[in-house]
Image (spheres, rainbow, N blue to C red):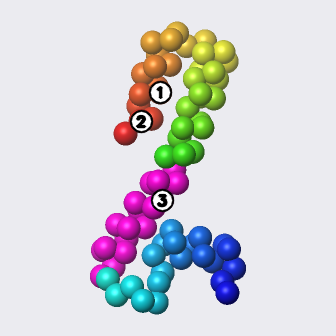
Amino acid sequence: MQKPKRKINNLLFGRYKHFKGNSKSTSVRSLDRLNLCLDDVRDVFEPYLAIFLAADRHWNPAQVGIAAASIRR
């Protein structure tokens, strides 16, 4: 039985014994999985960024909206 951290690394980085793909397809799959994980982080980060920019940096709502839109894909 693999340790949980090793299982996550294998899932993220495509290290499977039974997988016989080329390195490019492995890299693309790994990046897809990483992007999926980072999408959740972005959804959590965006409201805090908006509050920080409006309260601490005194940005107006239009500037905050532009900054938030630039984070999105």
- The extreme front residue here reads 1
Q: CA distance from mark 1 to mark 3?
A: 21 Å
Mostly what secondary structure, the magenta segment? helix
* Disc 1 to disc 3: CB gap under 8 Å: no
Please check the rendered image and state whether residue 58 is part of the magenta-colored stretch, yes or no: no
Vertical comparison of 37 with 43: above or below: below
Say whether marks 2 and 1 touch (CB < 8 Å): yes
Q: Which residue is mark 2?
A: 72
Give the left or right position of residue 22, taking residue 32 as reference: left
How far apart marks 2 and 3 lie (CA) works out to: 16 Å
Q: In the image, which disc is placed on residue 68?
A: 1
Residue under the image location 46 percent in, 19 percent down:
65
| Secondary structure category for the residue under label 2 | loop
Asked if residue 40 is positioned above or below residue 36 in the image, the reply reads: above
Question: What range of the chain is rendered magenta?
Answer: 22-38
- x 45%, y 76%: residue: 14
Please say if 64 is above or below 5.
Answer: above
Quarter that holds the C terminus: top left
- Residue 69 locus on image (x, y percent): 41, 28
Secondary structure at numbered mark 3 = helix
Q: Amino acid at mark 2?
A: Arg
Residue 43 location (% of width, % of height) = 54, 38
Q: What amino acid does circle 1 point to?
A: Ala
